[in-house]
């Protein structure tokens, strides 16, 4: 997979335009890539957005150049910077996930191997045994040369980070760099950076994390990792969301077995029943990840990019009605939507852009689209 479609290197003007574009209302990673594919650059996409959103019936607010410049200046106060997919220090494994973030904010030191990574996640209200096992797994993996990735939450996440401060750990944030959650882990975040680890987020400065932002963070935890270990997790938990995302990204999933009497073991035990690798030591993980390759599956084909006819007429209201009628709450492949509607690929792309910018659809795994209710 190419590191960044359409951008071998970015000029300062285009980099600023990309920041403005990804910070614009209703523009997520999938929409961002579609806009770049359609218009050729972020600068051209920003110029076209007013026309596109007028057709959608819901104009969006475009981030101004001053706001983007202020964010870049603000990041420097935290020792952080923006990294684009075309940059050589963009985390390599993230290239292989659907709808990879076009820009990330990161502060990092030299004490990391971004190619040999393991995600460790689990319960916030972890048991003493779960914390102890997490420390053992994380420290043994760190000593074996693996970098540990987690979400800076209480419990299992914090234990994994603390155990690998000196060998290398990456904390993925759900909010902005200045809105670390939970606040009682701010000292841990400083310890991670002081020891050469990394803090990473795709959210802007000032962004207070909401419930919906944690699954977005979890997709980056799994996307940065060759495999994900679930230590303790309730039946419905963010850790199981991370495991599901890891499977969608074709990453290995490991689970620690637990007592059937402990609700915190229900999720991990269920994962094992469904085919996750049962582990009791770091050696079990290392043995499996020795041959891990995130590019091994066709799942990592680049985001949907139809051949475009530059002078094609804009789609009509009838075309829009046909697409809305074909869509439902169940995600469907774009190719199937084109087949059923009979619309040209270029017209479908424009319609999906308009609907996305209007907040009427949502993308799943970068390739599937559904109505948003």
Image (cartoon, grey):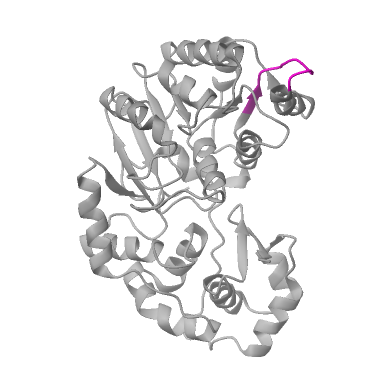
Q: Is residue 360 above or below residue 296?
A: below
Over which residues does the magenta segment extend? 253-262
Q: How many marks?
A: 0
Q: Position of residue 168 (x, y in %)?
A: 37, 22
Residue 368 visible here: yes
Looking at the image, which is closer to me, 360 or 227? Answer: 360
Q: Position of residue 315 (x, y in %)?
A: 59, 86
Looking at the image, which is closer to me, 90 or 3? Answer: 90
* Relative side of 267 to 24, left or right: right
Which residue sits at x=20%, y=46%? 76
Based on the displayed image, in which of its 4 quarters is residue 359 positioned? Answer: bottom right
Residue 11 visible here: no
Q: Is residue 59 above or below residue 368?
A: below
Residue 256 is one of the magenta-drawn residues: yes
Q: Position of residue 128 (x, y in %)?
A: 58, 13
Q: Main secondary structure of the magenta part?
A: loop
Which residue sits at x=54%, y=11%? 132
Residue 299 is one of the magenta-drawn residues: no
Residue at the outermost front position: 184
The C terminus lies in which quarter of the figure? bottom right
Q: Position of residue 303 (x, y in %)?
A: 54, 57
């Amino acid at each position: 997979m190419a590191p960044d479609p359409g951008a071998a290197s970015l000029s300062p003007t285009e980099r600023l335009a990309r920041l403005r574009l990804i910070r614009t209302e209703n523009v997520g990673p999938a929409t961002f890539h579609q806009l770049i594919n359609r218009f050729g650059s972020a600068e051209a996409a920003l110029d076209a957005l007013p026309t596109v959103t007028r057709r959608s019936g819901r104009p969006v607010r475009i981030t101004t150049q001053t706001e983007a410049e202020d964010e870049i200046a603000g990041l420097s106060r935290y020792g952080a910077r923006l990294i684009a997919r075309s940059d050589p220090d963009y985390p390599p494994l993230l290239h292989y996930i659907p709808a990879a973030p076009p820009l990330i904010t990161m502060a990092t030191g030299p004490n990391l191997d971004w190619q040999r990574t393991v995600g460790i996640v689990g319960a916030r209200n972890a048991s003493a045994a779960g914390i102890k096992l997490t420390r053992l797994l994380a420290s043994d993996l760190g000593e074996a040369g693996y970098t540990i990735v987690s979400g800076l939450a209480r419990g299992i996440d914090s234990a994994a980070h603390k155990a690998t401060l000196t060998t290398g750990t990456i904390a993925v944030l759900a909010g902005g760099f200045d809105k670390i959650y939970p606040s009682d882990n701010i000292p841990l975040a400083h310890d991670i950076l002081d020891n050469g680890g990394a803090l990473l987020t795709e959210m802007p400065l000032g962004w207070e994390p909401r419930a919906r932002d944690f699954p977005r963070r979890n997709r980056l935890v799994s996307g940065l990792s060759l495999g994900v270990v679930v230590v303790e997790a309730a039946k419905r938990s963010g850790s199981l969301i991370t495991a599901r995302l890891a499977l969608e990204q074709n990453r290995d999933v490991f689970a620690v077995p637990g007592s059937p009497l402990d609700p915190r073991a229900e999720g991990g035990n269920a994962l094992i029943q469904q085919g996750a690798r049962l582990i009791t030591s770091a050696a079990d993980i290392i043995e499996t990840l020795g041959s891990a390759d995130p590019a091994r599956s066709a799942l990592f084909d680049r985001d949907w990019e139809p051949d475009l006819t530059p002078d094609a007429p804009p789609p009509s209201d009838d075309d829009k009605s046909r697409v809305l009628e074909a869509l439902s709450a169940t995600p469907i492949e774009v190719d199937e939507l084109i087949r059923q509607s009979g619309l040209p690929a270029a017209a479908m792309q424009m319609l999906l852009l308009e609907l996305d910018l209007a907040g009427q659809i949502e993308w799943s795994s970068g390739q599937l689209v559904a109505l948003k209710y």
